[in-house]
Image: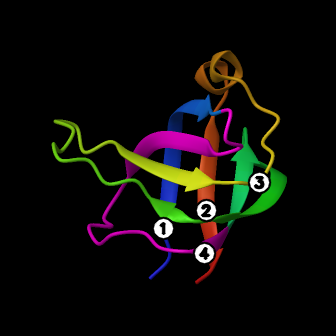
Amino acid sequence: MSFEMKIFDIFHFQSGQTIFAGSIAEKKELLKNSKVQLLIDNKKHQTIKIEGELLMDVKHPLNHRAISTTYFIDLTSDFVKKHECKLVEIEN
């Protein structure tokens, strides 16, 4: 079963890792390596591979989740907050 994540924020780390924070409807199991399409305002922007989901000891009260990648992502937090950005799984 594929997933779709609505992205609320994005974080870039010096290690080269990028974290997408957002919500995923109807997908409870842990996300693993897969290929996803990054959509901006419902237009294809970039195809990337995600490494998986970051685990936290405490669940977010609104079930927000965090997905990591090492692909270069040319988006800023400010941009993501002003546009409709999504990750849609295309391969498992």
Q: Residue under circle 2? A: 88
Q: Nearer the viewer, mark 4 or mark 2?
A: 4
Q: Residues under labels 4 and 3: Cα distance? A: 13 Å
> In this rendering, would 9 be left or right of 26?
right
The image quadrant that residue 80 belongs to is top right
CB atoms of marks 1 and 2 within 8 Å: yes
Closer to the chain start, of discs 4 and 2, is: 4
Asked if the stretch drawn in magenta spans residue 57, the answer is: no
Q: Amino acid at mark 3?
A: Tyr
Element assignment for label 2: strand
Where is residue 29? Give x, y as percent: 29, 72
Q: Residue furthest front?
A: 15
CB atoms of marks 4 and 3 within 8 Å: no
CB atoms of marks 4 and 2 within 8 Å: no
Q: Residues under labels 4 and 2: Cα distance? A: 10 Å
Q: Residues under labels 1 and 4: Cα distance? A: 10 Å
CB atoms of marks 3 and 1 within 8 Å: no
Number of marks in the rendered image: 4
Q: Residues under labels 1 and 2: Cα distance? A: 6 Å
Residue depicted at 64% across the width and 39% down the height: 85
Q: Amino acid at mark 4?
A: Ser
Q: Residue under circle 1? A: 3
Q: Residue under circle 4? A: 34
Residue bounds of the magenta highlight: 14-35
Q: Nearer the viewer, mark 2 or mark 3?
A: 3
> In this rendering, would 82 be left or right of 1?
right
Q: Residue under circle 3? A: 71
Closer to the chain start, of discs 4 and 3, is: 4
